[in-house]
Structures are given as structure tokens and as C-alpha cells.
Image (cartoon, rainbow, N blue to C red):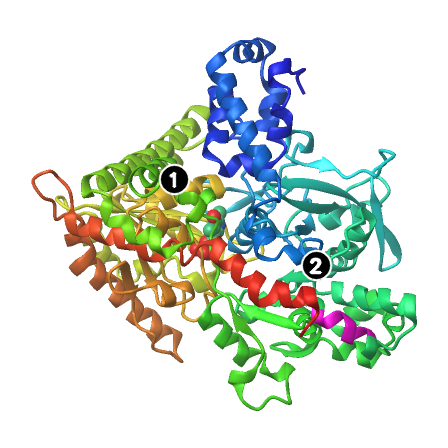
Amino acid sequence: MQQMPPKLEKLPELANNLWWSWNQEAREVWRRLDYPLWRSTTHNPVRMLHEISSEQLEKKANDPAFIRRLNKVLLNFEKAMSFEGSWFNTTYPQLTDKKIAYFSAEFGLHVSLPIYSGGLGILSGDHVKEAGDLGLPFVGVGFMYPQGYFRQRLPAHGWQEAVYQQLELDKSPVNIARDEQGNEIRISVKIGDSEVWARIWNVEVGRATLYLMDTDIEANDPWNREISARLYGGDTEMRIRQEIMLGIGGVRALRALGVQPDVWHMNEGHSAFLVLELVREIITQNGMSFHDAALQVRPHCIFTTHTPVPAGHDAFAFDLMDRYFWDYWEQVGLDREGFMNLGKHQEAWGEAFNMTVLALNMSGYANGVSQLHAEVSRNMWGSVWPEIADEKDIPIIGITNGIHVPTWIAMPMNNLFSRRLDPKWLVKHDDQALWELVDQIPDDELWQVHSELRYKLLSEIRERARRRWVQGNRDATEVITTGAFLDPDALTIGFARRFATYKRATLIFRDPDRLKRLLLNRDRPVQIIFAGKAHPADDPGKHMIQTIYNIAKSQEWGGRIAFLEDYDMHMGRYLKQGSDVWLNNPRRPREASGTSGMKAALNGVPNLSILDGWWVEGYNGANGWAIGSEHEYDNPEVQDASDAESLYQLLEQEIVPLYYDRDRDGIPRGWVQVMRESIRSNTAKFSMRRMVKEYAEQLYIPAMNGDE
Ligand SMILES: *Cc1c(COP(=O)(O)O)cnc(C)c1O
């Protein structure tokens, strides 16, 4: 890193805490420090400080306006780091010495740290940010994947290719955890025949800290170095090895760091082996039975399940479990049978050890991520509680997901809310009373800000297409498919998320001629922008990408369909802030919650969505559109046909006419009313702040006290 001039000596500290990424004034500091570098590093201040010239640093050190701006941000940063006055400290002053540990296989915090694949990871990242904002005593535990998740490349044939790149960790917002003597803190877990070592990286996320384990170190042989090499890149055996490290290694990492949690929160089943390690610790110290040790562990464990799709719950064959746990079960006071019973579950392919069943068996608290998902989960996992007769009594509660509002709000929208609602709106953004004031925002201002965001989205897309073109190694059609012909004034539908098949990305193409008539209408054109990656092992998902890619390529569709390559958080922000409508059409009830629609909603982008997940709770008849009904189908073919019909009707009869119904000033008054209602009704309700407060009140506080 460059030597800093004295007036800029705090910049490295500011760069090293991701707090800057959701603070608008702090972002402005980086932008003004060196704008071309801010762009070329895709908003990575740590890298900026490596690459910036000493002349530029000198220039900024001698720019009084910049220094004034910086000092103001540093003051706010200092305030934001102190727990004093935070929500948690004022609400629960007697609990401030407690600790919550939150385990997740992926965290989506910022585009410069690509250790997430989709909704689950972004949710974890948002959860950590908000937990810190509210002052919860909170640490996260996960993996540092030195190759991250794959980068998607779409060659001219449209079949997704996965490219893995080694991250430059010294230019990322991460630091190696060291003890007081300055030695790297390392932990080890016996996995199969070898002792596998991990070092630990710290990520500072506002007041919260994230600890990421990394097995890619010389102490390990090549096979074991691969354990944390990349996210979701391996087979089932790699998966169990990763999960042993995440759960068991994660507990050991916290102990080595001197963190003693009172609450253990498993975000998804990947980390569930941690419960076994907690039992093992107690037995090693006190020589109790498994039963008695489990009674001590359970009241402090929380499990959140995230999907009703059976394949989304990891299950391991018993022979695989034997290979990795044959010398572990006696350490937790069990024989083989007793041990296997902890996770025993009937899978489509036979009986196996299921991580969700293990987590449910060993947690005092469990929840699903929307009210509908909780209901589906009670039905799905009822067999874990054979003694409970009535499904309604199965102890899986619903806490509906939310999003971290400061992360997902667009800057011009943020400014508009500050101007028209309250300069301090962000401080009280989960207060519904604030949002009842949206009528104070004049139509023309809201429309103006939204139009600005749509132009920004489309110019970003065209700039990316142009860069591809000048790089030279791309076919012209590849440039066109990524949106070169998009029209900045056409009704723009956004669809971006993981390409899991239940999300039915191709549903809207069921009747191509009918869709073409909509898109190619000369007076009222419509365009659709797609983006998303399919899991590297998901061929049907890749097939869907290829189908849409080929449509985007075809002249017949007039350049009205685009498929953006390599979807990530950065592009996600542009899309959810600048589209006119956000489309989501999963096969109900497979979408546990969904969060991308929430990010669109608070930016005044109405949802057009199936009544699944969060939208069952969000839709109110005036804040967007509901595709289909709450009908339950046995036949997916019938379901698809019926949902597609509903989607076309909404577009033809309501959405397109309303969007193009302009007054003398060119403002679509009716449309703006839907935008306003979207903001009013969804922002507080689906904020991460509301969500984390519910986790605190319903789960964390009881688990801290150990009362189940
Ligand atoms: C929010 C988000 C998601 C989740 O999208 P869903 O439509 O809820 O599945 C996925 N990827 C990125 C990058 C996101 O920001």
C-alpha cells in the first residue's frame, strides 16, 4: 500500500471496514479521491489505495474541501463503531456482554468479496450489516474462498462457462487474524485420515466482525487445500469435508480467537455439525452422557431453513458418514446407531444423514423465512417430532426475510427521501409512520428520479457491451445479446437471479408470438433484461440460459431481449434500481422468500410476481401485480400454463397501458401511484432492520438466556 500523507492517514482504516459501502458520504470520499480508479477497481478502496499515485494522494491531502469531507465521514465512522446508544445497548443493557455467532456457507457483502452465489449469501451479508447497525454483539463465521464463486462467460453458443479467478487477498477488505505475538491463528480438524489446518481472515463489517476460514495453506496437502478453494464447486464428498470444516472448525476457530458465544445460529444446514462439536466439548470437560450434554447445547442453538426444495437440503449416505465420523461418535457419547439417528431421513434416493434433520433435532429454535415457507416447512419436517400430532404445533416459526436498506437504496432515491420525507429517514427507516408521508413526494420528482435511474442502468449496460466489443475477442452477436440495442425509453422488465429451474426464467416465452406482439409494438415497446448464473452442476438451469440467450440473439426479437453476462451484486443494484417492473415467477410454493423484489420495491420499482414467499405478505392490490392465485397445483404443466396466461393478461391489459398512459407533462400518473404505493407499503415491512429485531426478540434473547 502507498505511504499515506498525514492528513490521509486514516484512509486505510476506513477502507478496511465495509461500513463505507453503505454510507453514502463515505462512498463519496472514495469517488472523489480518484474517480477513474474508483470505477476501474469496481469500487474497491483497498485496491485503490494500492494503485493510487502519490501525486494524486498529495493533491487530495492539499484539497481543503476533500479533507473537510473526509473528516466529517471519519467522525461519523467513529460514532458508528461505538456501541453506545445503539438499539441493542439501550433496549437490552443487561445483555451487552453476550455473544451471538452466526454461521453461513456464503456471505454477500460487497462485489469486491465474491464469496456468495445468490439470495442466501446476500441475505447473510445483509444480516451481518444490520446486526452491527443495531449494535447486536454479533460475529459471523464462514469460509474465505480464495477463488470465490465462478465468473460467468457466455460464448456465442450461449452455454454458460465457469471461470475461476484467484482473488488478490491483499487487495481485498480482509486481514489475517493474529494472536498477540503476531502469529497467524490456526485451527485444525481431523477430516478423514488427515489433520486439516485453516487460517482465519477477519472482515470488518461496521460494528460486526466476520471470521472466514481458509484451508488453502502450505500446511495442508493439495486435496485438503481445495476444501475452501471455491464456493459450491465440488462433489458430495467435497461437500461433507467442507461442512465438517465449517461446523466443527468454526467452533474451534471462535475458541482460538477467544470468542465465547452464548447463541449459535445456523443459517441453513451446512454448518449443522457445529452442534456435535459443542456436545463433544462438554463431554470432554465434564464426562456427561450425550443426552445430558445435548440438554445444555440445545437451548442455545438456532436453525434457519431456507428452502422447501428437497434437493436444497444436504444429505449424506451412511457409508460416507462412516468414513468421516467412525472415530467421532464415541467422542460425543454415542454408538453408530445413535449417531446416525440424529440425522436419519428418507431421501428420494434412500435413507441418509440429513443436515436439516440434525439441525432441527439439536436446536432449541427453528424458523422458516416467510410465513408461507414456515407453514410448508412444518409440513415437510413434521416427522422430526413424531410426538406432535397437529402440524400447526410443529415448532418452526416464520420470520420473513428483509433487506439492508442502506445497501440497496439508490443514491438519487436516497436524496429524494431525505429532501421530501426526512433528512434522517435512514435512521428510522423501519418506522411505518415515516412511509405514510410518501404522498409528500410530487409525482414529477419521483418519476424524474426513476427515469434517471433507468438511463443509468441502460448506459451502464451499453458501456459494458461496448467494452466487450473493443476488447476484440467477441463476436458481434455476443455484444448485441448483452443489450446493445436496448431502448432507454421503452418499458423495461428486469429478471435477475440464480437460474434454478423452479424459478422458471423461460415461463414468459411459453407463447412466443403473443410475447412478440407485446415487445415489438411500435408505439408501446417493451423490453426484458435477464441476468443470472446457473449452478455449475445444473444442466437444466444452463439450458434455460441458453434458450434465452438464443432468443436475445435472434433478429426476430428485435433486440428487445438482453442477457447480461456475469450477474453480481453490482449489476444487481443497477437492475433493481433502474428497471420499470421487477418480474418473479417461481413455481409456487418453491420460493421460500425471495429478496430481489424487496430491493426493487424500495426504489419504487413495482413487483410483478407469483404469490409466493414474501409477495404473499407484500402484495396489497395497489403496490404491484400478482401473477396467478394462491391455488395449489398437482400438475406442474397445468400450473405453468395457467401462470403464463395470467402473466400475459396482466402485461397486455394492465401494465403496458398504465405505463404508457402519459399526461401533458409526459408523466404516467397512474404508474407513479403504483410506484409510490410500492415504496410506502414495502420498505419498512421488508427491511432487514425489522427482520433482525424479530430475530433478536423471538430467538436471540431467549437463546442467550437459555430458556427454550
Ligand atoms: C438479492 C439478490 C439475489 C436474490 O434474488 P431472488 O430473486 O430473491 O432469488 C440473488 N443475487 C443477487 C446478486 C442479489 O443481490
Q: Which image quadrant is residue 448 in?
A: top left
Residue found at x 34% / y 51%: 434
**Quadrant holding the N terminus:** top right
Residue found at x 43% / y 30%: 468
Mark toward the viewer: 1 or 2 = 1
Q: Is residue 628 magenta?
A: no
Q: Which image quadrant is residue 538 in?
A: bottom right
Packing grade of label 2 (10 A; few <14, some 14-19, many >=20) is: some
Which region is colored magenta? 293-299
Residue 124 spot, x, y in % from top left: 57, 53
Residue 246 makes an appearance in the image: yes
Check if mark 1's residue and mark 2's residue have beta carbons within 8 Å. Answer: no
Q: Is residue 386 above or below residue 55?
A: below
In terms of secondary structure, where does tag 2 sit? helix
> Does mark 1 have its CB less than 8 Å from ligand 1?
no
Residue found at x 62% / y 40%: 82
In terms of secondary structure, where does tag 1 sit? loop
Residue 241 spot, x, y in % from top left: 76, 58
Label 1 is placed on what type of residue? Ala
Q: Is residue 297 magenta?
A: yes
In depth, the one of 127 and 42 nearer the eye is 127
Residue found at x 65% / y 73%: 360
